[in-house]
Image (cartoon, helix red, strand yellow):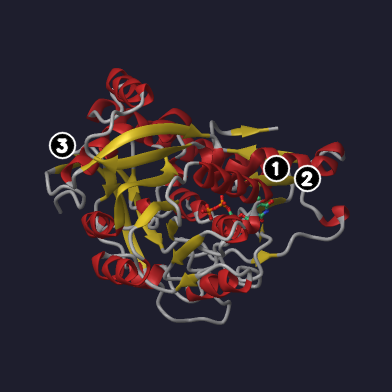
């Protein structure tokens, strides 16, 4: 398949094998066939964007029972409150209008709504739209595309800011999104979006950032090129520590002078050969090595008779569990705070997901940290576990037990 963003030719550099849908947590009595896809990553020779090789079934992925909730992390809630303040501070129009694509439970827009600013959240997950509405955020259960953009502009007028977090990389039809942005955005409006950064994935070896929902792995170089195809320019770029390392991109209609950060990061990506096949092949070799070493650590814990549980049934963990062949025999349980995941089985690997034990005495000897991107928040919360001798297994930035 050619590049979904620009139509140029692509080359494969990574094969993560047969994978389920990462958020398809299964009821234990569900005996229906599970949906599988072959997870392979390719890089485009034209715009340089990294993407999945095969199509993903978006309607099966983002639906009325979508289980990811932005507000499940305290740090992410404060990140989005700060983001909203920044967006508000930059609004110059007399009666501004802010749109968020992939607004989830309304965590970011809640601050915009509190300030009395006109806004609209658009998200296909009806359950999360319901939660956003309950916190007085104006939101709709829809897909963002050219048709939706037309309708929203007719109803509300042009948008001064279109924002998206961990959403643009989810949408294979990126040209469709850009056509929508061309329609919806005011002439002097900006598009701001943030997604996991290819540079961080290569640096940290965080191969679990690659799963069905992360169709694209963006970089400054690739976003600048894709934006150009649609009459936009990448005018600012900012590195974010959240979610294991992200970039926040600001796009405006062509003609604005980009900040020095844009040229600097594109030059750095060139020096680090971020999009070149030898660098990507080295990453693929590191991923295979990490799989073997992670399995060795889990085998060692089992041989020593130490109990191990997974910490957080993240979407990312689907890639780790299925690629490394880890099932209930090595990891009997994964604990998670999300009610919709509890009582179900992890996709593909079929490990029971349970709420965290109330009593520290019921904790395992060792936790395998799947939510490594929230490590700071989690380690602070679980200090007592460590104090009584509990240990963590990590696989990002390397495989480590301690
Ligand atoms: P996250 O890494 O944000 O997302 P993703 O699913 O996209 O990989 O992980 C969110 C999941 O982690 C969610 O199921 C809730 C769970 N979680 C906990 O169980 N405890 C915690 O302390 C945190 C921060 C998350």
Number of other residues with Cα within 10 Å of mark 3, as a class: few under 14, some 14 to 19, many 20 or more = some
- The reply to whether residue 313 is visible in this rendering is no
When the figure is inspected, residue 181 is found, relative to residue 131, above or below; the finding is: above
Residue drawn at 43 percent across, 74 percent down: 141
Task: Kindly indicate whether the residue at mark 1 contacts the one at mark 2 (C-beta within 8 angstroms).
Answer: yes
Q: As rendered, which of 133 and 283 lies closer to the eye?
A: 133
Residue at image mark 3:
45
Q: As rendered, which of 260 and 161 lies closer to the eye?
A: 161
Q: Earlier in the sequence, mark 3 or mark 2?
A: 3
Task: Kindly indicate whether the residue at mark 2 contacts the one at mark 3 (C-beta within 8 angstroms).
Answer: no
Q: Is mark 1 within 8 Å of ligand 1?
A: yes
Q: Position of residue 194 (x, y in %)?
A: 43, 44
Quadrant of the displayed image that contains ligand 1: bottom right
Q: Is mark 2 within 8 Å of ligand 1?
A: yes
Compared across the picture, whether 8 is left or right of 121 comes to: left
Residue 255 falls in image quadrant = top left
Residue 381 has which mark? 2
The C terminus: image quadrant: top right
């Amino acid at each position: 398949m050619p590049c979904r963003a620009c139509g140029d030719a692509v080359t494969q550099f990574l094969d993560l094998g047969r994978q389920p849908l990462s958020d398809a947590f299964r009821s234990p009595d569900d005996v229906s066939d599970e949906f599988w896809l072959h997870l392979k990553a390719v890089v485009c020779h034209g715009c340089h964007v990294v993407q999945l090789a095969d199509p993903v079934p978006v309607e099966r992925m983002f639906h009325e029972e979508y289980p990811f909730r932005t507000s499940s992390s305290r740090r992410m809630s404060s990140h989005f409150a700060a983001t909203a303040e920044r967006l508000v501070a930059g609004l110059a129009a007399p009666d501004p209008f802010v749109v968020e694509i992939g607004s989830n439970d309304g965590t970011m827009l809640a601050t915009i709504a509190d300030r009395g600013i006109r806004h609209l959240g658009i998200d296909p997950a009806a359950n999360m739209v319901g939660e956003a509405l309950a916190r007085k955020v104006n939101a709709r259960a829809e897909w963002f595309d050219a048709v939706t953009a037309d309708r929203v502009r007719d109803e509300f007028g042009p948008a001064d800011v279109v924002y998206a977090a961990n959403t643009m990389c989810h949408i294979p039809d990126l040209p469709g999104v850009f056509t929508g942005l061309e329609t919806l955005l005011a002439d002097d409006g900006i598009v701001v979006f943030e997604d996991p950064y290819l540079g961080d994935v290569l640096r940290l070896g965080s191969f679990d950032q690659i799963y069905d929902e992360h169709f694209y792995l963006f970089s400054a170089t690739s976003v600048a090129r894709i934006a150009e195809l649609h009459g936009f320019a990448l005018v600012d770029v900012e590195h974010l520590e959240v979610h294991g390392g992200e970039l926040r991109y600001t796009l405006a209609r062509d003609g604005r002078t980009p900040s020095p950060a844009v040229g600097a990061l594109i030059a750095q990506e060139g020096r680090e050969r971020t999009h070149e096949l030898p660098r990507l092949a080295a990453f693929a070799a590191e991923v295979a090595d990490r799989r073997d070493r992670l399995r060795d650590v889990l085998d060692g814990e089992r041989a020593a008779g130490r109990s191990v549980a997974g910490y957080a049934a993240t979407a990312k963990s689907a890639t780790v569990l299925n690629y490394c062949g880890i099932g209930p025999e090595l990891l009997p349980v994964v604990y998670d705070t999300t009610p919709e995941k509890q009582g179900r089985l992890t996709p593909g690997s079929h490990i029971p997901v349970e709420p965290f034990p109330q009593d520290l005495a019921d904790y395992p000897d060792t936790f395998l940290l799947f939510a490594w991107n929230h490590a700071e928040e989690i380690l602070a919360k679980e200090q007592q576990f460590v104090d009584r001798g509990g240990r963590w297994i990590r696989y990002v930035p390397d495989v480590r037990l301690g």
